[in-house]
Each structure stands twice: as structure tokens, then as C-alpha cells.
Image (cartoon, helix red, strand yellow):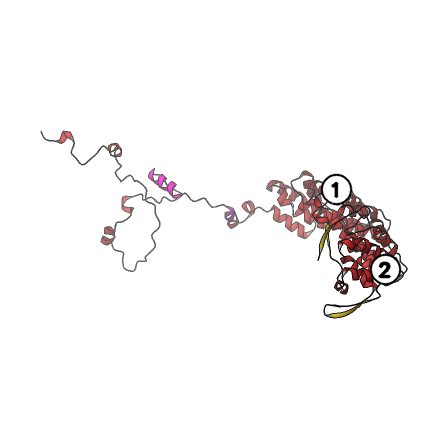
Amino acid sequence: MSKRYIARDPRTGKPIQTGGSKARNEVTYEPTKGPWMALSHEEVMLLAEGEVAHQEVHWMGQAHRLERPEGVRGLSSVRHGLIRPAHGLLLNALADNEPKVRIAGLQVLPEFAVRRSDELFDWLSVLLDDEDKSVRKAASEALARAAPTFPSGVRSSLELELRSNDGHRRRCAWDGLNALAETWPDVVADHVDSLLLETNVELRRKAATMLRKIIARKSSAVWDLVSWALNDEDVVVRRTAAKTIAQLASHDTRMATMFAERAVSDADAEVRLSAIKAIQRLNRGHGRARDLILAGARSNDVRVRRACVSLLPKLLAEEELRGLVDDLLKTEQDPGLVKQLMEMRFDATLEGTEAEKNAALAPALPVPQIDREVMHAQGKAVGLLNDRPADPSEAEATPADADMNPRPVGAVQTEPEATVRPLTSRHERRPTQDELMGYHDDEPDFDDEPF
């Protein structure tokens, strides 16, 4: 069964303080699986100690003959009460004269170290230089697996292995450093710090690739690393560092702007282009970012000019943009950029055809129905055409009028236009004040009654 273990200091055995990223630094280890899992814990101990030469077991439907190396591998799964004697047996296995036993001890070392790590990493550093090649290979692989959980235990060994002349040992060390960046980026920053000072350009190039893994750390140490990499004499190191500026822009706009300002003036075109891509992620309304874009629009590198010119419409108002475009067209020689600038300067409302000018006009908003009725009631026209009947003869015909004036035979029936009847018209009788106040009834007035 898998268990979750918290990273512990290999010297003191106490949990390492991880601050707010405690959950991320927990590492899940599973005991190594194999035929030895069919043995009891006591049988594993006897087999690892050498008291029993071999043991016959059935596992996964097959018969297996287990010897001391298999017993050593089974030490990672012993119960808690047997950890101390199992730890002694593992140390003996790492010091054994038989290479197979030493390899078995190295294969189980990372899993066992989370339970008890005393002296294990000292033996690991020794076996990295073992006389047997297969033992050295197993030690390098154990170093890569243990690095994410025990950065202090493997620190010195990792520093040496990163600079090893042996290809396999160097690859395992870099694999361990990459895994370490997921759990302890601050420790990786220390390794990158020393690697960027190396005279070997390959080490500096590989160290620059680690910047993207630790750039999210809002730390002055990481910012210093990016700054040093941007000033490196090797162009590949500078290109790699410049690509991290865009990633930094989402974490720290101020530092990203400073690095972009430096990279945009680099002698290499790739570095300048990476700086422009970073500026696209920055707040383009910011003063310094705005100045960088305007300066890049006049760069000697056509790719930088293209990137900056495409940002101008989002940065400047129409009048200011036309003035800048006219200025840029005086010196621009690239046909594609000239065409793009001409399109920016073109104004359809002023220089377009009649159809383009009309298309740019916004249609008038419709007058609400209630407003139309009120205006008709006041005798006012709505729009350019007055849809209120101007003559009584043009008023809406009653059904009786329709019967008296039938439509001629062959006339085309058309849909009547929607008209709005006003609330009142000048031909309708308006109610008097007495009628509005209710001073009327069906009875005759008192003065009209006969005496």
C-alpha cells in the first residue's frame, strides 16, 4: 500500500519546514514490488542478512527462487518495528563485496530513506565512484530518484554529478535537478546560480533552461539569475533567458518590463523578438512599455518592426496613429509593412467611396411608439415623412366607404402600411372641462325645467 511521507532532513530526521507549499513537497513512495512481497517480514530479514541462502516462493502464479539481493529489496516493506534492524542490514548490503547486493541496496535506498536515512547518503556518494560500472549506474539512478525528497542529503553529490564527464551520470543528475524544481525551486536556484558562473558554455546553456521552472518564484535571487543570463556572452544563453520574460510578465510586470527593455536592445534578433513578445503580454498603456513599442516600430530588425507596428492601433488614438504612420512611411522599405501602414492610415469616412462612407454611418435609433403617439397628439411630424393624415379625405376609410368604392378589377392587393392613429386630431371634438371634472349627467338642468 502506498504511503505519503513528508520530506525530512537527512541529518536530523526532523520534518523540513516548507512554509505555504507543504502539501506540494509531500512525496508518495511505494515499496518496491517483486516476488519478495510473498515473504513474511521475518523471512525478508533472514534472507537479507544471509542467514538463509535462498527461499522458494510462488508469486503472480509463478515459482521464484529468491536469494540475498531479493531479500535486500524487500527491506522497504518491513513493518515499523523492524525499521532499525532493517536499516543496519541495508548498510551492510551497501558495503557488501558482491556487486549484485550493492545494486539491490541502491535500488531500495530512496524508498527506505524516508523511514530512516542515517548514513545512507554517505554511502550513496561513495558508490557513485564504485569500481563496478553497473553499481555506478545504479547509484546515479538512485541519486535522481532521491533528489526531489532529500535536497540537502544529495546536494554535494548532485553538484559533482551535474559536471561529470560521464554522459549517463550527467543525464541522471539533470533529471534529478528537474524533478527537484517541482518540490524545491529555491534549491534549484542555488544550483543554477553556480552553474551560470561556469566557464563551460554547455553547463550555462543547460542552466538557462532551468530558469523557466523557477521563474514563478517572486524572489530577488531568481531575478538576478535572469539578469545574469541576459548579459551572458553566449547568444544561446541569452535567447533562452529572453524566452522566460513573457512567462515572468504574468507574475511580475515591473521586472518583466525592465528585462524586456534590456533585451529589446540586444544585438541578437531572436532576443529582441522574444522581448517584443513579452511586451505584448504587458500592460501596453504603461509608460515604459509604450515607449518600447514606439521605439521598436523604428527598429532595424524587420521582425521587431512588424511585431511593434501590429500593436500600434491598440496603443494610440486615431489622430495620433495617423501622424505616426505618416512619419513611419517616410522611411519604411518593407512592402508588407508599407501595405499594413497604409491600411492603418486609410479612413473610410473621409477617403472612401460613397458606399463606404454610408456604411460607416450609424442608423438612427427608432422612435418609441409612445413618443410617436405623443408627438402626433401635439400635431408634430415624426421623422422625414409625416405618417399622420394631412387631409380628412386621406383618413382611414371605414368599411362602408370600402363598399361604396370597390377596388377596380385587376388592381394589385398590397399590404397596408402600418399607421399609428393619434390619440386626438384637430377634427375630433375634445372633451370640455366640465366633462373632464364629471359635471354632467343625463338629467336636464334646473333652469330648463318648465314652471
Task: Report the front residue among 113 and 394.
Answer: 113
Drawn side of residue 5 relative to residue 387, left or right: right
Answer whether residue 256 is magenta in the image.
Answer: no
Looking at marks 2 and 1 on the same chain, the residue that comes earlier in the sequence is marked by 2
Task: Report the front residue among 176 and 444.
Answer: 176
* Residue 432: image location, x then y, percent: 25, 34
Quadrant in which residue 296 is drawn: top right
* Residue 259: image location, x then y, percent: 74, 43
> According to the image, label 1 marks what residue?
219
* Residue 93: image location, x then y, percent: 85, 58
Secondary element at image label 2: helix
Number of numbered callouts drawn: 2
For label 2, the crowd category at 10 Å Cα-Cα, with few meaning under 14, some 14 to 19 and many 20 or more, is many
Drawn side of residue 420 relative to residue 337, left or right: left
Task: Report the front residue among 355 and 51.
Answer: 51
Answer whether residue 361 is magenta in the image.
Answer: yes
User: Does the CB distance between marks 2 and 1 fall below 8 Å?
Assistant: no
Task: Report the front residue among 443 and 18.
Answer: 18
Magenta residues (range): 357-378
Amino acid type, callout 1: Ser
Q: Which mark is residue 102?
A: 2
Which of labels 2 and 1 is toward the front? 2
